[in-house]
Image (cartoon, grey):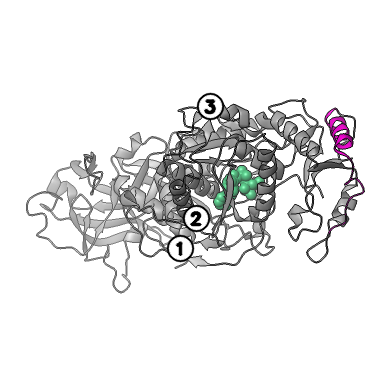
Amino acid sequence: MVTTTRPRRVPTKIVRMSFSNPSPSDATPRTSNFLRQIIESDLEKGTYASRHWAGSPGDAAHHAAGHPDTARIRTRFPPEPNGYLHVGHAKSICLNFGLARDYAGICHLRFDDTNPEKEDVEYVNSIVDAIRWLGFEWNGVKDAAPYQASDYFDFMYRAAERLIEMGHAYVDEQTAEEMRANRGDFGQPGVDSPCRNRTPAENLARFREMRDGKHADGSMVLRARIDMASPNINMRDPAIYRIRRATHHNTGDKWCIYPMYTYAHPIEDALEQITHSICTLEFEDQRPFYDWLLEHLCEGGLLASPPPHQYEFARLNLTYVITSKRKLAQLVNEKKVAGWDDPRMPTIVGLRRRGYTPESLQLFAERIGVTKADSWIDYSTLEGCLREDLETKAHRAMAVLNPVKLTLINWDDVMGVGHLEPCTQSALPHPPEGVEAPARHFTIGKEVWIDREDFEEVPPKGYKRLFPGNKVRLKGGYVIECTGCIKDINGVITDVLATVVPDTKSGTPGSETVKVKAAITWVGVADGIQAEVRMYDRLFLDAQPDAGGKEFLDLLNPNSLKVVTAIVEPSLASALPDQKFQFERHGYFVADRVDHVTGSKAVFNLAVGLKDSWGK
Ligand code: ATP
Ligand code: MG
């Protein structure tokens, strides 16, 4: 059978994890895990201490001529440039780069571009940007060019010839159907191909013909010669080279045969002197072939010893989220979202526009840890990490998301006609050490905007905000006492009315003598600015939109985006795209690119609410 892609994920049992007691982000402890234990044990035993490194990837002779490797371990992140990276990749990036950082090693960025049809330079660039944004550098040199698996095609070809010479590979001319039928299944051993016992010389001649374009696409493949009766079906003479007339973005039309992923990947690792090759669990059944291949190529003197070793960990499954590039592409192509960087997308570019920080994603990766059993992580864990990171960093600001006007009916009398009183508040109530919190300036006058929800004509039980006869503080301003409201002919409230209590301005002596039970946020009519605020919610209604054969496109949340016109305080006029804020009492927001179609308004995206409220 010819598989051109990697093994598919199998459904796994669901274990729920919850983190009720998060640790502070600035002192995130590096919890041990099975990979750390393996690395520590290898370092102690000196498993890889004798390795040489020639400064660039290469075969045994190349590295033998180099120096003892100063990197104590080498890990790698090997994306296929066929889509944008998502939160699952972020886990893998933080894991591989994090291990290299913690054990004085180097992590490689390698584009796994052995499949000629699917790659695109748009994806290559976005992957480079995403990793850099997450805070990592690759290949041990600043601004190094990433490695490319397609640069190893010559070696892969040479290795294939060597396997043939050693009697470990043969050209098979069975049809795809015959090969599939003859592979057997779990209960049934496979049947040898009639081509299996050709001589190395015959196989070499055929393989060279394949390379030289003498045979049609799909007419024959090169197979490893292992064991057609192996209980592991992946060991029943897997295909390692196929004929495919396709132009490759790196090598052009040089090749009409391409290596299979399962053959290419171990070789890529070995040429790069990777020590710990960490991948997701679905590759576990491939490990025997990984070892088989590298063992024979080391034996044949082509690759340096000791070869890399593969370890598997559980991929990230996040509730309410899809982490399949193919399905994410479907959301984009079918215009269910506005693009790869739509703030509802779990892509790194999407998370970034949603307000996620590199630190919050690193914290998330650290907190969920690595295990050998598949599990589902609750979406609230991710949100909690962002909240935790922004708590001390995001500047505070006031915003009124659902505005109604409040008129202070005695203002002109007690403060003076048209008077605007300047107010000052700190942008950071609890600044991190060594950070000086900037001050925010705004004014209060006769008219201010408040949130509609902060007034009730007839207050429900326990309601502490504005209702006739009640006093509240306008945060950072004055205490006011509500007197009533004005409604239009439809009964919709157009104005809330109140009186200002003199001498209660926040921060002035005696301001606390009038006691109130609540402080509400507000923005002055005189200096508030209009902003478009995009209130995002989860993209799917189902916690596992991708599981059990469900049609994920039918499970989209119709209310995942609501756009409101808000009034925000004047300090936000200078907000730069990507800057995060806490809109007091509302949540964390990030300034977005201004949409010139809708004018020069400021635009903010909801990153995460102040409390975990979803589903409650
Ligand atoms: P997809 O299924 O979305 O196409 P992939 O695994 O094919 O993902 P690659 O570009 O090959 O995507 O992934 C690069 C690395 O990221 C691999 O080592 C892979 O194991 C890892 N990775 C991908 N998805 C996840 C995930 N959900 N959790 C953890 N690691 C992941
Ligand atoms: Mg893939």
Viewer-closest of 579 and 585: 579
Q: Are marks 1 and 3 in contact (CB under 8 Å)?
A: no
Query: Whole-percent x and y of residue 214?
Result: 90, 30
Residue behind mark 1: 614
Q: Does the magenta stretch include residue 210?
A: yes
Residue depicted at 53% across the width and 27% down the height:
66
Q: Does the magenta stretch include residue 429?
A: no
Residue behind mark 3: 66
Residue depicted at 78% across the width and 39% down the height:
166
* Magenta residues (range): 190-212
Query: Whole-percent x and y of residue 340?
Result: 58, 42
Q: Relative to 238, is 323 on the left or the right?
A: left
Q: Which of marks 3 and 2 is nearer the N terminus?
A: 3
Q: Earlier in the sequence, mark 1 or mark 3?
A: 3
Residue depicted at 56% across the width and 25% down the height:
65
Query: Whole-percent x and y of residue 391?
Result: 32, 50
Viewer-closest of 92 and 190: 190
